[in-house]
Amino acid sequence: MHTNTSAMEVAEKERTPGLSLGEEKNMVTQLLLVNITVFILLYFIKIIYLMEEYGEPAFVRDILSNTIVSATPSTLLSKPWTLLTAMFAHMDFWDIFSNMVWLFVFGTILQQRAGYKQIPVVYVLGSFAGYATYMAAVNLLPGVFPPVTAGTGIMGAHAAVMAMAAGVTFLSPGLRVFPQLWRGGVPVWIFFGIFLLLHLASVSVGDGSISHLAFMAGGAIAGALLAIAFKNGSRFGDKAFDVFYNITHYFDPKKKLSRKASAEAATFPEPPSRNPMPFVKVGHVPEHRVNEILDKINDQGMESLSPEDREILIRASREEE
């Protein structure tokens, strides 16, 4: 356990995640950009409606009702695209601000532990599970939740972020992160507890809706199940990502992923012999070897590291000091 934690600390020290807009494998950044872009777009359209004196009811009827997931099953069946649009849609500034902060926190940790391919899969499946629990709650428990009307629905990244929070906590409950905030790092379960308490508090003081708790419950269940499956050796997230990536890049064969390419990447081939550059050593550890291990963490997560990889990271860090 000590070696595992030390390796994580070294990885954080060597590669502190940032908002790199050009890094394809930073899926957390890309999700942040999509959510923020959709928020700006919806707000801009709303302003146009108000300026043209169509009024907010017209905006809700024409735009918002075609973006959120309706609580009425028949309406949802007639608008299946909302299953995708709703998970990225926000209309309140503090709503998107809090979701994006927690998405960055939990998404970054999960990306380090499980690899970048798991991020969009957890995000989407967490949202879908949230829709299911939300629909069941508001339709089967009318005495507990507000009555369903024509405009009742749900949107936002709440369930997706909860899926990542639960996923990280179940995957590595004893993990300590962000050592720069506290000596030795802060236990990840503390972040999860703060996240949960803030949402419970928002409902208790009337700033949040109890329907959102039902929405987030589905995300928590999905995140926990995916984390347990990952710990048991399942690579469902990687396979799902590869299938989706290849579908979206069908007309760009050069960028399509293949099992052979993934396997070759995992074996860390030697750098090209043409125009070779001399290796720079970090103490007695070549710098290129450290970079290869860090790339492996980004692709497949901390859990993919062998004992030798972990020892190299720790040794490199000690020699730097």
Image (tube, rainbow, N blue to C red):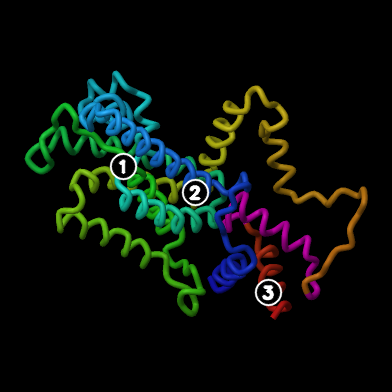
Residue occupied by mark 2: 230
Residue lying at 51% horizontally and 39% vertically, measured from the top left:
236
The residue mark sitting in front, 3 or 2, is 3
Which residue occupies 14% across, 32% down?
148
Residue beneath the point at 23% across and 25% down = 73
Q: Which residue is mark 1?
A: 91
Residue density around tag 2, few if under 14, some if 14–19, many if 20 or more, within 10 Å: some
The residue under label 3 is 317
Q: Which residues are magenta?
A: 283-304
- Label 2–label 1 contact, CB within 8 A: no
How far is mark 3 from mark 1, CA to CA?
45 Å
Q: Earlier in the sequence, mark 3 or mark 1?
A: 1
Residue 294 magenta-highlighted: yes
- Residue type (three-letter) at the residue carrying disc 3: Ser
Q: Residue furthest top?
A: 78
Q: Position of residue 303 (x, y in %)?
A: 57, 57
Mark 1, secondary structure of its residue: loop
**Can you tell which of label 2 and label 1 is closer to the viewer?**
1
